[in-house]
Structure formats: C-alpha cells, structure tokens
Amino acid sequence: MPQKDPSTEQKIEAVIFASEESVSSQEIMQVLDEKLSAPEIEACVERLNESYASTGRCFRIAGVGGGFRFLTLSSLEPTLKKMLAPKIQRKLSQSALEVLAVIAYQQPVTRGEIQQVRGVSPDYFVNKLLERGLIDVRGRADTPGKPLLYGTTKEFLDFFNLQSLKDLPKLREIKELVQDKEIQDYLSSSEETTFNEET
C-alpha cells in the first residue's frame, strides 16, 4: 500500500520539532515552499495543540522569540527542574547571568555601565555572551570614546523561552524567585568566576 503524502500540518509540526530554536512563520513558509500565510500557519499550530490537548500530551507548540517551539507543560516544571538545572548551570555561571541580566534590563548598555552596576569588569563575560550569540553590538554610545552598546538577541529570547522583552520578569517577581530556597541553593552552587563551556 503506497504511503500517504504528509499533510501540511504534519510538515509544519516536523519543521518545528526538528528545529533546535524557535522557527518563525516566514522560515516555515520557506522550508515548505507552499503558498501559506502566517495566519494559516498559526491556525495549523492551534489545531496541532488542540490535538495534543485532546490526547493528553505533555507538550504544546508555544510562541517563543517571534516564532514557534515545542515546550513541555508548565505543570511538569517540578518534575523537570532537577534534570534541567545542571544543564543551565553548564551553560551560564551566576556571574554571566548577572551580566546578561544587566544587559537585558538596561539595553542598550555599555561595558562601563555594566561595570558600574556590578562593581567589577564585565569584559570576560561580555565576550563569552557575544560568542554564545545571546547578546550583540547595537552601535556606539554618543559619549566620549564612543563605547560599544550591547543588547540581547533572538537567541536570548529563545534560551529563556520568552516571546519578547516585555515578558521579562518584573523586579517584584525576581525578588520572589530569589527568596525561593531551591533557587538560592542552585545559585550558590554555580561557579562565580567561570563560564563553563558545553561539551
């Protein structure tokens, strides 16, 4: 019996599933090479999510960083936290996260401004964050010396599962997170001066 050609929904599902980062409607259109509009792709994603929900799947396709990505349900976070924490720790040390946080909340920002906030030179971590693609150069400041300005990238949004910078936690939410004992224990176990590279 001949195998049935995959449907458009299956193709969209496959493209999102195979991508290691969020994939935009435009990228999906290019891969499928079909006459599809962004609303039609969104409608397909909705139908796929309805199917996942009706069959009790533990994942959904979510909007992340201006595109689509498979994510597990938030209700499963406690189950996955212990497994994912070491992975995040391997990627970014606490000091790197601090530098990244300053950039995320104050962008565009110079190295000098980051140093004013943290009290120590951010050069090492800025360079590593640039290598990782989590930040990029946004131009030069209109101040003496014309220092470079830094901001976050699409990869940053994808890394932290954010749709846009508007989804960054508010300061009140951050304070609540810092008071969480599990997070305090995790941060205290992070290396203070090493940016660990993934193998």
Image: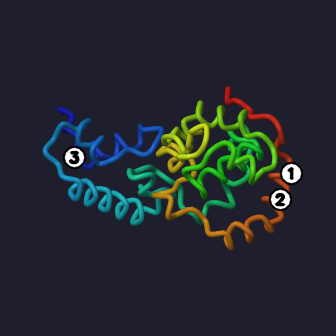
Seen from the viewer's position, the closer of residues 49 and 63 is 63
Mark 3: few/some/many CA within 10 Å (<14, 14-19, 20+): some
Say above or below: 92 vs 72: above
Instruction: Give the tally of numbered discs.
Output: 3
Q: Marks 3/2: CA distance?
A: 46 Å
Mark 2: few/some/many CA within 10 Å (<14, 14-19, 20+): few
Q: Position of residue 18 (x, y in %)?
A: 41, 37
Q: Marks 3/1: CA distance?
A: 48 Å
Please give left or right for residue 78 compared with residue 46 in the image.
right
Q: Position of residue 44 (x, y in %)?
A: 26, 56
Seen from the viewer's position, the closer of residues 128 and 40 is 128
Counting residues from the N terminus, which is met first, the one under dot 3 or under dot 1?
A: 3
Counting residues from the N terminus, which is met first, the one under dot 3 or under dot 2?
A: 3
Say which element carries label 2.
Answer: helix
| Residue furthest to the bottom | 172
- Residue designated by label 2: 184
Q: As shown in the figure, which amino acid type bears the numbered disc 3? A: Thr
Q: As shown in the figure, which amino acid type bears the numbered disc 2? A: Gln
For marks 3 and 2, give the one nearer the viewer.
2
- Residue designated by label 1: 188
The residue located at (62%, 37%) in the rendering is 129
Say which element carries label 1.
Answer: helix
Q: Marks 2/1: CA distance?
A: 6 Å
- Residue designated by label 3: 8
Q: As shown in the figure, which amino acid type bears the numbered disc 1? A: Ser
Residues tagged 2 and 1 counted as in contact (Cβ below 8 A): yes
Mark 1: few/some/many CA within 10 Å (<14, 14-19, 20+): few
Quarter of the image for the N terminus: give it: top left
